[in-house]
Amino acid sequence: MMDLTWYLLGVLTGISALMLRYLAARMQLTLVTWGGLLAGIGALLFCIAWAVGAYLEGVPRAAAMGLLMFVLGGIVILTVTARLIAKQNRDQQGGAS
Amino acid sequence: MAEEKKNSVEVSEDEVMAPASEPGGVDEGRRNLLKLGIAGAGVAAATAGGVVIAKKLEGIPHDETYIPIREDYKPFDGRSLMQAFASSKQLIAKYPERVKAWEREVRKRDSKWDVVGGNAEFRKGKMSDVPGFTQLDYALSHGAWHTQSKFHGPAYGTNVGLFSWAQSDVAKNKWKFKSRLEASDTIKSAAKLYHAARCGIAPHDPRWDYHPLYDPVTEKEYSWEKDFPFKPKSVIVLLSEMDYVAMAAAPTVLADATSGQGYTDMANQAGSMAKFLRGLGYQAVAAGNDLGISTAYAVAAGLGELARAGWVIAPELGPRIRISKVYTDFDFVEYDNPREYGVTSFCENCKRCAVACPAKAITLDDKRTFEPVYEGAEDPDYTWNNNIGVFQWHSDSKKCWQYWCESGSSCAACIAACPYNKPDFWHHRFIDAQNVIAPGWVHSAMREFDILFGYGDINNPQKIKDFYKSGRKL
Ligand code: SF4
Ligand code: SF4
């Protein structure tokens, strides 16, 4: 089961990398937003691995706590980063026109 | 016009440089270079951090002074081993002042527990309808102890069964190894074959031997010089792992069952290793809790670090281990070094074992000391069982023994509660990796998270049910 999880996480990491490339080609990304995107996606992937591991070892509470902490953390980071990217691109467009 | 054309440089549209401030301009190029530089620096820092963590997880090597001892330190007297003393009629009769001091402290706790009758009480057990103490649980435990009891005798016995000192089967031809590394590799590979979880080799160190040796079963005293069959040069230390799910049911008889299986494994593994060395033409004696301090030898062999509760914490296995030893005159080996794994600094901030201990036998002091500091420790007749002069956390194992006798199990709540007691899953190894570089306040936080995430809770009847289902897929 854990082996399958690692495989799926590999696939998800690949998809995330493609999405980041797509985003980088269309939006202006700064170091901070790059950091935010990587940290946010990392937290979500980490959370999946943590939850499955904890569930498999028979400690569902650890799985639930992991989901709560890392998913929330990941979502907060990604939301803030998304707003930052949107703002920076808006400003740039405003400056250019 | 022609002149003008001549002097001008023809530049294609593609080659036109963008203004410096526009994307793709000179500044942008520099910015991209800077980004790459920062990303490169990040990768380099992460790699360096990874190397530091890997080194720390491997353990920082030390020399034989790693366990600090005071100048007046004397090797531990085998007659002062708590369980050996408690089970020996002769020692109890010989040292009435110890019994008196012990009883005084017991009465202070408003207990009527009988120090002298304690051993018999423990042997009887406390079978009842309480989950974890039923006929089923005791039968399981007796099964686990069976091989050990049948082929060795009590856990603290000396020169008996598989731990016998007989050397009649030493082969005449001495097997020669090409190198020290080959010899160590061979010994450790044999340990793996005998199902040891870890193996380390330390030089023999008389500081960690019992002087004199004492067998409470036969009530015999032995001397290293006169009675032991040879002069030991090396001590091979073996760790056997106890069952995580059974241990999680502490402090019930299920934890005693996995301890019993640990003792059976100790006798099997050390007995086999000693027999192997004798077959190679070298003298060897297997030992469990006898001959010398197992924890000190395990540290000397680099297998783990001494923890607050008095036992050794081994990387990845935590405290859920039993230690056996093989004393031998074979010394053409590569010795292991004591190693620092960050356990001591974690223990300074954790104290979870001390809080979990139903007998309050484990000290809550932040720092280690050379002498015990628990209640009653000012009386030397009460601290006879402590290894005074060694810098460590000194527990009051007499309180622990009282709890064992009164509860009818060998407890192990401290092991079950310890944050290092985890099964082999990636996320625990991840936490281990961050623990070795984290400062003290993070260790305190990790203990709290451990509790919050549901690890190490004791007295949980669900854990008993979980154990009896844990073999379903076997
Ligand atoms: S075995 Fe139980 S009583 Fe003994 S020190 Fe550990 S927690 Fe305390
Ligand atoms: S419970 Fe905490 S203090 Fe006790 S031995 Fe384990 S890590 Fe150390």
Image (cartoon, coloured by chain):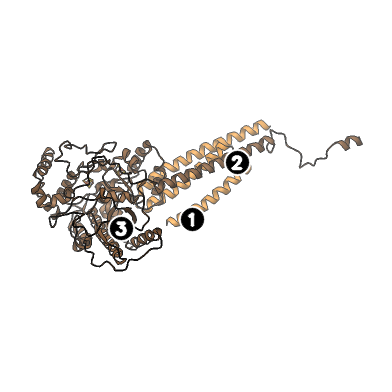
Chain colours: A orange, B brown
* Residue in the image at 21% along x and 47% along y: B76
Determine the CA span between mark 3 and mark 2: 51 Å
Query: The C terminus of chain B lies in which quarter of the figure?
Result: bottom left
From this view, report whether residue B460 is shown above or below residue B366.
Answer: below
Query: The N terminus of chain B lies in which quarter of the figure?
Result: top right
**Picture coordinates of residue B312, whole percent (x, y):** 30, 48
In this image, B317 relative to B27: left or right?
left
**Picture coordinates of residue B27, whole percent (x, y):** 67, 34
In this image, A94 relative to B151: left or right?
right
**Picture coordinates of residue B88, whole percent (x, y):** 12, 52
Residue B470 bears which disc, if any? Answer: 3
From this view, report whether residue B405 is shown above or below residue B107.
Answer: below
Mark 1 lies on a secondary structure that is helix
Camera-side residue of B406 and B195 = B195
Determine the CA span between mark 1 and mark 2: 29 Å
Mark 3 lies on a secondary structure that is loop
Label 2: few (<14), some (14–19) or many (≥20) C-alpha neighbours in 10 Å = few
- Which quadrant of the view contains residue B392? top left
Q: According to the image, label 2 marks what residue?
A: B36
